[in-house]
Image (spheres, helix red, strand yellow):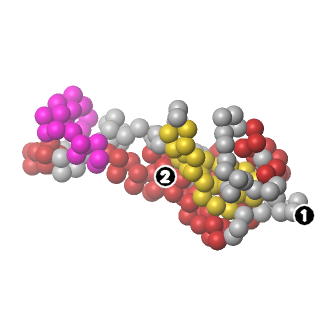
Amino acid sequence: MTENEHIEDMARVMSGNFLKFTSFGMSSDDRPADPENWTIYYTLTRDSRATCRSNAKVIAEAMEPHLLADDCSNFTASHWAVGWTRGYLLRVRTADGALTPQFTTLAELLIRAEDYCILDESALAAEEQAEAEAAWTGMSQTQRVEYLRECSGLEMDSMASLMACARGDFPPYDRNGYGGLVDQ
C-alpha cells in the first residue's frame, strides 16, 4: 500500500469517528454542520506516559499552522472514568471530497508512528528527564538513599556525586535509563 493509499484508508476510517463514540456529548457550538467529514484525534490523556506526551508535542508543533484555519481546532473532553483528554477536532475532507492539509499532516505523523512509535527521540529524552527529576525530588532523602541501596548498575564517578544524587540534586541514571523512575 502506498502512503497516499494509506492516508485515504485512514481518512475513511477516521471520518465521523466521534459519531460512533458512546457516552459522548459535544456542545452544539463545537459540533460541525457536516460531522461525517470531521474527526477527533486525541493526543493526550490525564495519565499519558512520556512517549505519548513527547509525541503529542511533536504533533502540536506540526498542527500549529493549521489551527489558524476554521477547520482545525484544539479539542478537550472530560470523562468520569479517564479524566481529561486533549487533541484535535479537524476536517478530514473538503466539500469537494479532497483531503485537507491538516488531516494529511496528522496522517503522515501517524504513519511514521506505526513504523517506530517515537516521533522525536530528543523530545522523549526531555520528557523522561523532566519526569525523573520530578519523581526524584518528590522523594524524601531517606527514600532516595533506600532507592540507591536497592539499585545495581548505577555508576557514580565520586562519593560527592553519590551524595548530591541522594540530596536530590539529580536523579540516578544508568545504561538502562532512569532505573524505574520513568514509565514509558
Residue position for label 2: 54
Q: Please name the residue shown 18% across and 47% down the image.
A: 168
Residue 147 on the magenta segment: yes
Q: Give the farthest residue toward the top.
A: 150
Q: Nearer the viewer, residue 73 or 99?
A: 73
- Helix, strand or loop at label 1? It is loop
- The dominant secondary structure in magenta is helix
Asked if the stretch drawn in magenta spans residue 80, the answer is no
Element under label 2?
helix
Disc 2 residue type?
Ser
Numbered mark located on residue 96 in the image: 1
The residue shown at (82%, 50%) is 36
| Amino acid of disc 1 | Asp
* Residue that appears at 32% across and 45% down: 132
Assess disc 2: are there few (<14), some (14-19) or many (≥20) residues with their C-alpha within 10 Å of its C-alpha: many
> Which residue appears at 90% of the width and 63% of the height?
96
Give x and y (percent) for residue 20. 75, 38
Query: Which residues, given as a range, are shown in magenta?
Result: 133-154
- Which of the 4 quarters of the picture holds residue 117? top right
